[in-house]
Image (cartoon, grey):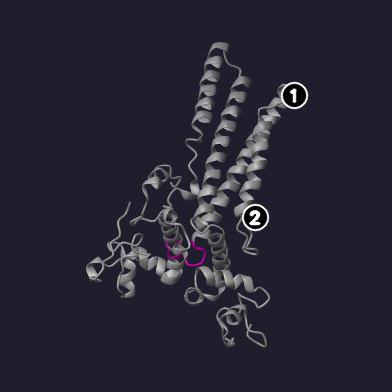
Amino acid sequence: MGGNSPCASCKLLRRRCAKECIFAPYFPPEDPHKFAIVHKVFGASNVGKMLQDLPVHQRADAVSSLVYEANARVRDPVYGCVGAISYLQHQVSQLQMQLAVAQAEMLCIQMQQQDSPPSSLVLQKELVDDQKSFLLQNGFGGNFAPQVLNNVNLFPSGNVVFTPQEQSLKRESLWT
Amino acid sequence: MFTSSNSVEGSSSRRCAGCKHLRRRCTEDCILAPYFPANNPERFECVHKIFGAGNVARMLKMLPVDERAQAANSLFTEAYWRVKEPVYGSTGVVIRIQQEISAIRCELAKTLAQISMYEAHNAPRASATAATPLLQQLDTLGTQENMFLFDPNNPFNFS
């Protein structure tokens, strides 16, 4: 808190750190880089307004997420945090595909252990092998849409500006 | 390619959304104009509320021209999520996807373990199992995902 030592934000902004300084609880003087990066991306004034609009018990989490996003933006000035989301969603797709292959393999093993007439068993196994082959060739798990993202539109509506090269990126979007 | 909607004389009907909001003349070389058209004022207002026009202009200026459109889009997406979820913003989306990844990895590990069990039971002397290559990929994926792990106690965790 204010006290003898100004918080990191007041130190950077070269102002008196008041007792009720909104930044002080979240930007201690021992970690100047934390406020510096948030200030660089969002601006102190905007961060202050965002924190003021939140109940006190949610401000620490808000600061953590702002630091995370600011760091992402500094590391990747073009895509920022959105780049991380894109990468992680690609990982979801890869894992879903692998899960689908594993589950198909499991089904195959279970059918082999069933006590069925040989001809129908062979037909069932061929169908499952075909399904596995299809999944591997198409690189997607098919029916296993991410539950958490089913109702989430990750790209907000509104005019999104694309250059001609990015039209292909838009078609290949991984957003649900 | 989106065309600029700026104007030389500053006629209000031809100013970009940024200059209209900031009540200033929109010049021919306005950095905001190509990415914040006048017919979508909410897009600029959202970005201005979270990042500030000055920061947006500065960030766009630092980039090569062919990357600015994508940067403006990602800034808008982040601003949109921050307005929608004031506490976590787009970080909330990262957290939810990480939880999804965790759930799928659990399910995958369980299934691979079952496959290994069946194969061990049925062919104990088999040297390679179907699960082994998939298990190896699972380990590799885990390492890559940790690059973007959000830890509220260490929000700087970007390797």
Residue B127 shown left or right of residue A53 in the figure: right
SS at circle 1: loop
Estimate the x, y position of residue A38 in percent, counting from the top left. 55, 70
Three-letter amino acid code of the residue under disc 1: Ser
Residue visible at 31% across and 75% down in the picture: B24
Residue B145 at least partly seen: yes
B138 versus A75 height, above or below: above
Estimate the x, y position of residue A115 in percent, counting from the top left. 61, 17
Q: Where is residue B49, by image quadrant?
A: bottom left
Residue B35 shown left or right of residue A35 in the figure: left
Q: Neighbour class for label 2 at 10 Å: few (<14), some, many (≥20)?
A: few
Q: Which residue is mark 1?
A: B127
Count of numbered labels shown in the rendering: 2
Q: CA distance from mark 1 to mark 2?
A: 37 Å
Chain to which mark 1 belongs: B
Q: Where is residue B133, by image quadrant?
A: top right
Question: In the depicted view, which residue is nearer to us: B141 or A109?
Answer: B141
Q: Is residue A156 magenta?
A: no
Chain to which mark 2 belongs: B
**Given contact means CB atoms under 8 Å apart, are the residues at marks 1 and 2 in contact?**
no
Question: In the depicted view, which residue is nearer to us: B7 or B43?
Answer: B7
Residue farthest toward the right in the current orientation of the protein: B125
Question: In the depicted view, which residue is nearer to us: B108 or A81?
Answer: A81
- Please tell me whether mark 1 or mark 2 is closer to you in this view: 2
Q: Which residue is mark 2?
A: B159
Residue B85 at least partly seen: no
Three-letter amino acid code of the residue under disc 2: Ser
Query: The magenta stretch spans which residues?
Result: B80-89
Q: What kind of secondary structure does the magenta stretch mostly adopt?
A: helix
